[in-house]
Image (tube, rainbow, N blue to C red):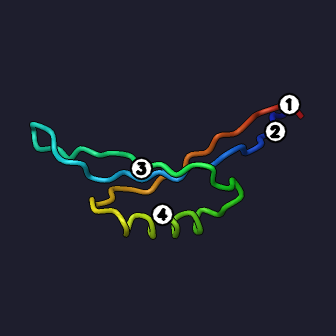
Amino acid sequence: MAAHRINVSTTLKFKVENGTTDTGAIKYATRSYGAINPEITDDDLYTIGQGLAAMQTHEVGEIQRTETATLSAD
C-alpha cells in the first residue's frame, strides 16, 4: 500500500536578525506569511520572499518554505 500526499497549505517564513545574546551570538525572529497556494513554485515563492525581505528593517538571515500535507492510502 503506497501513501498518497495531498498538499494542504504552504507558509513562507524568513528569519530576521533581532539583536544579540549575552555571548554575542545573533538572535533571530521569524516572520511568517500563511495561506499561500501550495502549487506555487519554489522560484516564485523565493522571489516573493526576497521582495518581502527587502521591506524589512532588520537583516534577513534565510527564507524558508514550510508545507503541511495530508497523507492517505491509495
Residue under circle 1?
Answer: 73
Tell me which numbered mark, 1 or 3, is placed earlier along the sequence. Answer: 3
Left or right side of 58 for 30 = right
Tell me which numbered mark, 4 or 1, is placed earlier along the sequence. Answer: 4
Q: Amino acid at mark 4?
A: Gly
2 and 1 marks in contact (CB < 8 Å): yes
Work out which residue is located at the far left of the displayed protein and give it: 23
Name the spot of residue 57 as percent of width and height, x first.
28, 62
Residue at 72% x, 45% y is 7
Tell me which numbered mark, 3 or 2, is placed earlier along the sequence. Answer: 2
In front of the other: 5 or 9: 9
Residue under circle 3?
Answer: 31
Residue under circle 2?
Answer: 4
Label 4, label 3: how many angstroms apart (C-alpha)?
10 Å
Q: Amino acid at mark 2?
A: His
4 vs 2, front mark:
4
Residue under circle 4?
Answer: 49
3 vs 2, front mark:
3
4 vs 1, front mark:
4
Label 4, label 1: how many angstroms apart (C-alpha)?
34 Å
In front of the other: 4 or 17: 17
Judging from the image, what secondary structure is the residue with disc 3 in? strand
Judging from the image, what secondary structure is the residue with disc 4 in? helix
Tell me which numbered mark, 4 or 3, is placed earlier along the sequence. Answer: 3
Q: Is residue 36 placed above or below 5 in the rendered structure?
A: below
Q: Amino acid at mark 1?
A: Ala
Name the spot of residue 54 as percent of width and height, x first.
37, 69
Q: Is residue 50 placed above or below 10 in the rendered structure?
A: below
